[in-house]
Amino acid sequence: MRLRFAPSPTGYLHVGGARTALFNWLLARRSGGSFILRIEDTDLSRSTEEAIEAIIRDMRWLGLDWDEGPEVGGEHWPYRQTGRVNLYRRAAEELLREGSAYRCFCLPEELAERRERAVKEGRSPMYDRRCRSISPEESLAMAREGKPFALRFAVPEGETVVRDLVRGEIRFRNEEIEDFVLLRNDGSPTYNLAVVVDDLDMRITHVVRGDDHLPNTPKQILLYRALGEEEPAFAHLPMIVGRDGKPLSKRHGDVAVGSFQERGFLPDAMVNFLALLGWSLDDSTTIMDRDTLVAGFSLERVSSKPAVWDDEKLLWMNSQYVMAMDAEELAHALMPFLARAGLAEGDDTEALEKMRRIAPLIRERIKVLADAVPLVAFFFREPEAEEEARELLVGEENRAVLRETGKRLLELEGFDAAALESALRAMAEEMGVKPRKAFQPVRVALTGSKVSPPLFESMEILGRETCLRRIARSLEEGGMEKG
Ligand code: GLU
């Protein structure tokens, strides 16, 4: 199988595009075939270099590697449509020669006006095919005179059947298909021409894409036939919708792959989640690593019903993947987030070492990597006690606990979590304070918050000096607050 993902680089990579890329990638990997990345940048006014870079970056982040395409090359180079325009022109000329295409001299203003009138009068706004009746000789003569023209496909009579691997057989009456443009009057190719020429040239066997392209498919099939070729197999993937049933868009929240990366979703979780948008392995399995996805994926189990995007499910899934990470992996994954928050340098080995010890303490408390930042900040900088936690630093009992804690920490022989716990429990008992109540001022003094990662493990990581300093500082500030 030879499959391709063919994004138009007009913005960020949308999660819907990523799902399309993933399904193609899974089929290629499953079949031992090839996955091709092709940049469809013929729309010069909307395509940008930044968008191409973003697509490549996001595909790499998701781990969807391609066998042919930008950066990796391949025998059908270049994999950018702007570098392949001659191929499209050649195909268009062939179609013209064979009588499957004709020159259309209608000017854009005229077309717009006719379309408007048709709509007003309740007729189809389709091109009325008037230039189709110009004889080839006259057409050539007009072209030689320098009259601008577009090239249109002459849609034949009859009916076109799309045999879709997901949706089954769909019939289109050709009379409802417009004589669509192949080359615009500036000589630039349209999507329908370029995509067919490329899919033929690159010997694509399966076109797997969003079902918003279904209306294009009969046109493309007609083009294959007119070029004397067989069309590839088609599979149109169901739309992704929000909970309101409308196509997933910015109104629903994040839709750019890049913003999920920024929030700290893991590529494996993302891939797992995307795979389940319109496909299932069976009736119950949700967590699947890449190998399982590759081994189990098939178009037969792709649904034709819209797939609903569920943020909660994605968060849950991500937390499952976070929990499965070992301390080393999690620490590495968190470093960029610490760096962005100004808590550490990206290549700070000391911070990384510390993060390795912290990771097991927070692994079950975060859903996305960014959640870790507020939880771990106190390990990296002096905490400011949160407003609602300050009360725990004043009052006689709290201050007595803090003073006594300071003393015991000073005397303690080792400084590991177990020793800390038994020392502070003994202290609470001797002072006649419930342990949980005794630990709260200590927690606030050390972390700035009433909720934190496990206290004794955190103290061990902070170390004796830091703990003592923070307790002393809290006593000082609490004293001032009291007046
Ligand atoms: N460039 C088209 C898009 O981004 C590709 C459609 C196709 O896969 O044929 O929608």
Image (cartoon, grey):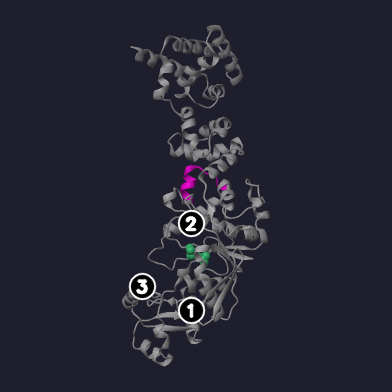
In front of the other: 299 or 380? 299
Alpha carbon of mark 1 to alpha carbon of mark 3: how far? Answer: 18 Å
Q: Quadrant of the C terminus?
A: top left
Q: Quadrant of the N terminus?
A: bottom right
Per the image, the residue denoted by label 2 is: 55
Count neighbours of disc 2 (C-alpha within 10 A) and say few if under 14, some if 14 to 19, many if 20 or more: many
In front of the other: 328 or 130? 130
Q: Amino acid at mark 3?
A: Val
Q: Determine if the magenta segment contains residue 266.
A: yes
Q: Amino acid at mark 1?
A: Glu
Q: Is residue 197 visible?
A: no
Question: Residues at badges 1 and 2 in contact (C-beta under 8 Å)?
Answer: no
Question: Dot 3 lies on which element?
Answer: helix
Q: Which residues are magenta?
A: 257-267
- Specify whether tag 1 is near ligand 1 (CB below 8 Å): no
Q: Determine if the magenta segment contains residue 140.
A: no
Q: Which mark is residue 175?
A: 1
Q: Is residue 368 above or below residue 163?
A: above
Q: Main secondary structure of the magenta part?
A: helix
Farthest bottom residue?
A: 137
Question: Which comes sooner in the sequence, label 1 or label 2?
Answer: 2
Question: Which comes sooner in the sequence, label 1 or label 3?
Answer: 3
Per the image, the residue denoted by label 3 is: 119
In front of the other: 327 or 481? 481
Residue visible at 59% across and 41% down in the picture: 321
